[in-house]
Image (cartoon, rainbow, N blue to C red):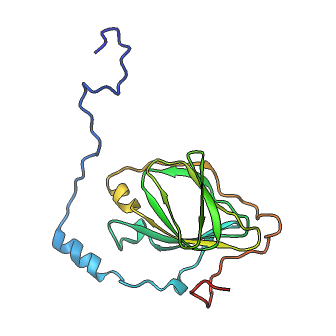
């Protein structure tokens, strides 16, 4: 260690705590009973899209539900020409592209995608999602390990640029496809 006090607090000679202590009552039998009493099927038609006017989300399983301990699952729909908020978070995420075409910007690098692709957002990556079509919406099923990170008290999430509050010009009337009939996502 430098004796003049100039050494960083991030040095290898000091023990550090990476995960905080987890304490409290935990009974595996009770936890398994609680989990097994939760619904095993969530009906998508009963869940409504939120947010907008450019990017909409339908949350199937999220940490606050208590249904799972390991993942978060939601559907994202981007209107024609839409973009999401620019943000970063500790947990990884995988976006299975159901329909449409677009791109991601991850830490300043562009990655193009289309229906059938999977876009992976790595831990601590500042990213933003874009629908490249000015005429058609795009959709992705998003899977995250967010509950596990919350359980470990790894809570970092930062919004760099918030979700747009105005619709894309020319797509002012766009609404998420709440009651679609064609689940094969064909025209």
Front residue (pair 169, 34): 169
Q: Is residue 86 left or right of residue 167?
A: left
The N terminus: image quadrant: top left
Residue at the bottom extreme, as displayed: 181
| Image coords of residue 139 (percent x, y) | 60, 72
Query: Residue 140's quadrant in the figure?
Result: bottom right
Q: Is residue 27 left or right of residue 108?
A: left
Residue displayed at 38% across by 14% down: 6
Residue displayed at 69% across by 66% down: 54
| Image coords of residue 104 (percent x, y) | 60, 57
**Relative to 168, does residue 59 appear above or below in the rendering?**
below
All told, the count of numbered labels is 0
| Image coords of residue 83 (percent x, y) | 67, 60
Residue displayed at 34% across by 59% down: 148
Front residue (pair 1, 32): 1
The C terminus: image quadrant: bottom right
Query: Residue 50's quadrant in the figure?
Result: bottom right
Front residue (pair 150, 30): 150
Residue displayed at 63% across by 87% down: 180
Q: Is residue 154 left or right of residue 84?
A: left
Residue at the top extreme, as displayed: 4
| Image coords of residue 110 (percent x, y) | 61, 52
């Amino acid at each position: 260690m430098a004796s003049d006090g100039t050494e960083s607090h991030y040095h290898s000679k000091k023990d550090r705590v990476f995960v905080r202590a987890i304490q409290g009552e935990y009974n595996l039998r009770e936890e398994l009973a609680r989990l097994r009493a939760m619904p095993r099927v969530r009906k998508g038609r009963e869940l409504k899209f939120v947010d907008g006017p450019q990017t909409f989300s339908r949350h199937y399983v999220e940490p606050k539900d208590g249904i799972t301990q390991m993942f978060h699952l939601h559907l994202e729909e981007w209107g024609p020409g839409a973009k999401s908020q620019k943000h970063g978070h500790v947990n990884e995420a995988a976006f299975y592209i159901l329909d449409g075409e677009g791109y991601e910007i991850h830490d300043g690098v562009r990655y193009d995608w289309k229906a059938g692709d999977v876009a992976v957002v790595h831990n601590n990556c500042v990213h933003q999602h874009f629908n490249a079509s000015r005429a058609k919406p795009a959709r992705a099923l998003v899977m995250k390990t967010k509950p596990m990170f919350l359980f470990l008290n790894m809570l970092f999430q930062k919004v760099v640029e918030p979700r747009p509050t105005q619709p894309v010009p020319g797509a002012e009337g766009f609404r998420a496809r709440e009651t679609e009939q064609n689940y094969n996502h064909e025209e």
